[in-house]
Image: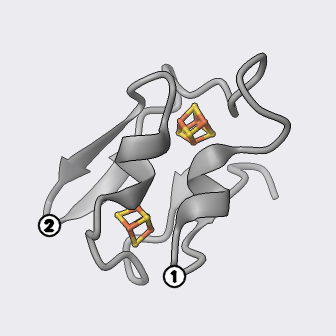
Amino acid sequence: MIIDKDSCTACGECQTVCPTGAISPAKGVYKIDPEVCTECAGEADEPQCMNTCPDGCIDYLTA
Ligand code: SF4
Ligand code: SF4
């Protein structure tokens, strides 16, 4: 998953719902570590960060 840094408002909502701790603050916005992100496999049917972001700035890395 990837965060569009131009749209992110740094609200932090995505970090609170991530089951793997892949999301952290960086350079005034938030970023997802692709080495840690599992796309929520085994945790939820859909990526929780994507469903939670109020600004719709999270999408699949390869979308
Ligand atoms: S898809 Fe799931 S594991 Fe990956 S960053 Fe989002 S909440 Fe975390
Ligand atoms: S939920 Fe969306 S706007 Fe909020 S910090 Fe995460 S990516 Fe940025």
Query: What residue is shown with label 1?
Result: 55
Q: What residue do we see at 48% from left, 22% from top?
A: 20
Residue drawn 65% across the image and 24% down it: 38
Please state, as top left, top right, bottom left or bottom right, where the C terminus lies in the image.
Answer: bottom right
Q: Is residue 56 above or below residue 34?
A: below
Is ligand 2 closer than 8 angstroms to the Cβ of mark 1? yes
Q: Quadrant of ligand 1?
A: top right
Query: Amino acid type of disc 2?
Result: Gly
**Secondary element at tag 1:** loop
Q: Position of residue 27 (x, y in %)?
A: 14, 60
When the figure is inspected, residue 60 is found, relative to residue 5, above or below; the finding is above
> How far across and down, in percent of the image, does residue 2 sit?
55, 53
Residue denoted by label 2: 28
Q: Quadrant of residue 45?
A: top right
Amino acid type at image mark 1: Asp
Q: Is residue 25 left or right of residue 44?
A: left
- Of the two numbered discs 1 and 2 on the same chain, state the one appearing first in sequence: 2
